[in-house]
Image (spheres, grey):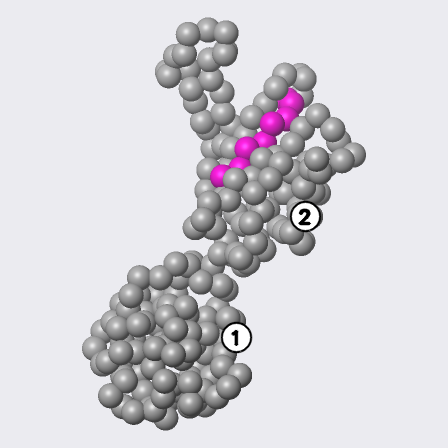
Amino acid sequence: MKSGWTPLLVTLLTLAAPAALAQSAANGETLYKSICISCHGLPPVGGAILGANNPSLIRQAINGLVPDMKLVVGPLGFNDAQLADIAAYIATVVGGSQPPVTTATDYSDLWWNANESGWGFNIVQHASGNIFGVMYTYAADGKPLWFVLPGGSWSSSTVFTGAWYQVVGPAYTSPFDSSAVNATQVGTATISFIDPSHASLSFTVNGTTVVKPITRQPF
């Protein structure tokens, strides 16, 4: 590949990109130095380029935007994980940061424990991968109780953790009173997904930890 393509690589890598798959910059370094370095050198771009982490644009370059790149990479190309790793490595070299870890699986659904009917956990997963969770259950006195998980972060592609709040508000039969709405953080919650339909919900309420196996509720 001609060295003249280096500015194009800079442009591709510095465009804004959505959050990528969980990445290994170490593996990306191995791949970059075995193939890409012959044309792009090290460091791969000049200057302090921030946010250089875009696997999809690297794929576009290899698959036709820059014909010479496909010749160097070879007919098999890179898979999605390899592209993500290469992008992560380049980001560390040029001073950009790796994107937050997220997941490719959409877990949005109503989840429950089939052996414990009467309570459940709603998961709404946004396009960004962030999760908003709502648990409806009962207190020790049998009264309804609501908890919310209003966002958080992925520590891996299957483990999501965030602050856990208990919420109360005015009765639906009364005029709405915003001053009666209150959300109090009582701990943290972690969802550990085993597969697309099975998970473990662990949460802490005022120092007491509860762990519940949950599954998608079938309809």
**Residue interval drawn in magenta:** 132-139
Q: Is residue 70 visible?
A: yes
Amino acid at pointer 2:
Ser
Task: Judge whether 39 appears above or below 89 on screen.
Answer: below
Quarter occupied by the C terminus? top right
Check residue 98 for magenta coloring: no
Q: Residue at x 45, y 87 (%)?
A: 73
Could you tell whether 215 is left or right of 40 in the image? right
Front residue of 51 and 72: 72
Pointer 2: what residue?
A: 197
Within 10 Å of the Cα at label 1, are there few (<14), some (14-19), or many (20+) other Cα atoms?
few
Q: Residue at x 69, y 48 (%)?
A: 198
Q: Is residue 33 visible?
A: no
Quarter occupied by the N terminus? bottom left
Magenta region, main secondary structure: strand
Could you tell whether 84 is left or right of 4 in the image? right
Q: Residue furthest left?
A: 47
Could you tell whether 119 is left or right of 62 in the image? right
Amino acid at pointer 1:
Asn
Front residue of 203 and 36: 36
- What's the distance in space between the residues labelled 1 and 2, CA to CA? 26 Å
Pointer 1: what residue?
A: 79
Q: Residue at x 30, y 72 (%)?
A: 12
User: Upstream in the sequence, badge 1 or badge 2?
Assistant: 1
Task: Judge whether 169 appears above or below 173 on screen.
Answer: below
Residue 205 position in % (x across, y down): 57, 33
Check residue 135 for magenta coloring: yes
To which quarter of the image does residue 182 belong? top left
Residue 52 bears which disc, if any?
Answer: none
Q: Residue at x 54, y 30 (%)?
A: 147
User: How many numbered discs sit on the rendered protein?
Assistant: 2
